[in-house]
Image (cartoon, rainbow, N blue to C red):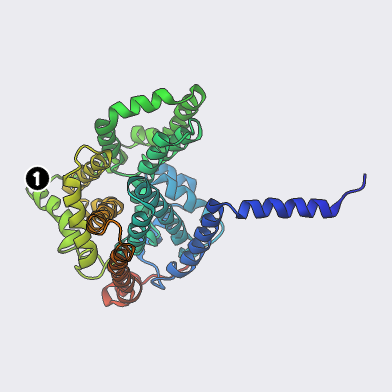
Amino acid sequence: MKVNLKKIIWTCWTWIKALLGRREVIYGIILLFLLVGTIFFLSVIPAKSALVEINTANQSKTLSQIGENPLWLPYKGVSFIVLQLSSSIRSLRAISIVFFGLSIVALYRILKRWHSDKVALFSSAMYATNATALAVGRLATPLVLLFGWSLIISLLLWLQHGSSKRIAPFTLACFSAGLLYVPGAPYFFILLILLFGSKFKILLGSMTREAYYASVLAVFLVLTPLIISFIQDVNVLRLWLLLPQHMNWGVVPRNILDVPSAFLYRAPTNPLLGVGRLPILDVASGGLFLLGLYSYRKHLALNRTKVMILTALLSVIVGALGQLMFAVVILLPFIYAVIASGICFILDRWYVVFPKNPVARWFGVGLISLVVFSSIYYQLTRAVVVWQHTPETRAVYNQPRLIQ
């Protein structure tokens, strides 16, 4: 049979043009190039590795080591695979950067649902360039998994507003089961059920039978190593619940107050992730955050407000247990969700004053853009230029990049 090569080539070219003509595909290609470029750039900042990164790699070299303490299993499992191919700390940092990128996309999708494309883009860009978020996102440790709660909220919104009754529930079940390996995870899910219990019943009722049974089976299989580790070593359970060996109730109020203080006033000294005691937010993002809090005060009945309450309660619990950095990292994506509300609040007030004047409306958007870009410039300078060259940071990142 004679093959019409020209017809095959033309058919393939028509299919490729139709595929590239879809906006989602173009966005996906752009994001892929940005991710690859970010990995090459961020994975060498700083040039050397920290001892905590080396320890994380050593704990993921064999399956037996992972089995002894399966906490942070999603990160350790991927690290085990990567370590079979490369012994450079840059490869492990790439894992964190990819997960950080997923959290950025998840936050964008959440804010796009809650506000608008413009507000979502501004806020997601500010979150992606925050100095602390970048430091966590390129650190070769499982700490980046604490950004995963934004993925859970994004998947819940997909399940609630999307049309998929098979893929969405199964994806949510698998992600939730994987994130249950993160210390402190039970507090998040307990609070999530308490705040949205009635909605979960409705969502479960809308699932197909096949999706329901597949999700239950997937959760059981994923969580089996965690359950076995609890039975074999109760210390793993204590670490999972973030319980200190000796609880000092006298410092609990101070621990709780240190969480908001880290964002607006004074962060804890941690050269692994920050510069001195500089607060996590700058003047621009801090002002937008306070405006966002004011805006949420008038919308207490909204589900998004309940999400903010959920994360605030979670951070209070984790902070009270003495895990300040955990509390800060958990809050970071949702802090920028509040900042998005602040941006939306300013634009809404501006549009009320100038409802039909296009020049004035674009001038307002230009002013907001200037504030956003000033915050981005400050945070990037702090993360890329200042942080890696401070003596404290160099003293922490003093290990060779190749894992021995």
401 vs 247, left or right, is: right
Q: Is residue 195 visible?
A: yes
Rendered image quadrant of residue 302: top left
Residue 71 pos. (x, y %)? 37, 44
Query: In the rendered image of this protein, does residue 133 appear above or below residue 2?
Result: below
Residue shown at 32% from the left, 66% from the top: 359
> Considering the numbered disc 1 on the image, is that residue within a helix, a strand or a loop?
helix
Vertical relation: 393 (above or below) 13: below
The one of 339 and 250 positioned closer to us in this rendering:
339
Give 252 or 27, whichever is nearer the viewer: 27
Q: In which quadrant is the N terminus drawn?
A: top right
Q: Which residue is mark 1?
A: 249
Q: Quick one: which residue is furthest to the front in this view?
A: 356
Amino acid carrying label 1: it is: Trp
| Residue drawn at point x = 6 percent, y = 48 percent | 250
Depth check: give the residue in front, 79 or 283.
Answer: 283
> Residue 42 location in percent, x, y?
43, 67
Bin the neighbour count of mark 1 within 10 Å (Cα to Cα): few under 14, some 14-19, many 20 and up: few
Q: Residue 147 in the image: state x and y as whole percent.
A: 34, 51
From the top left corner, tell me how far across and down residue 22 is, in percent: 57, 51
Can I make out residue 225 in this image? Answer: no
Camera-side residue of 393 and 30: 30
Quadrant location of residue 304? top left
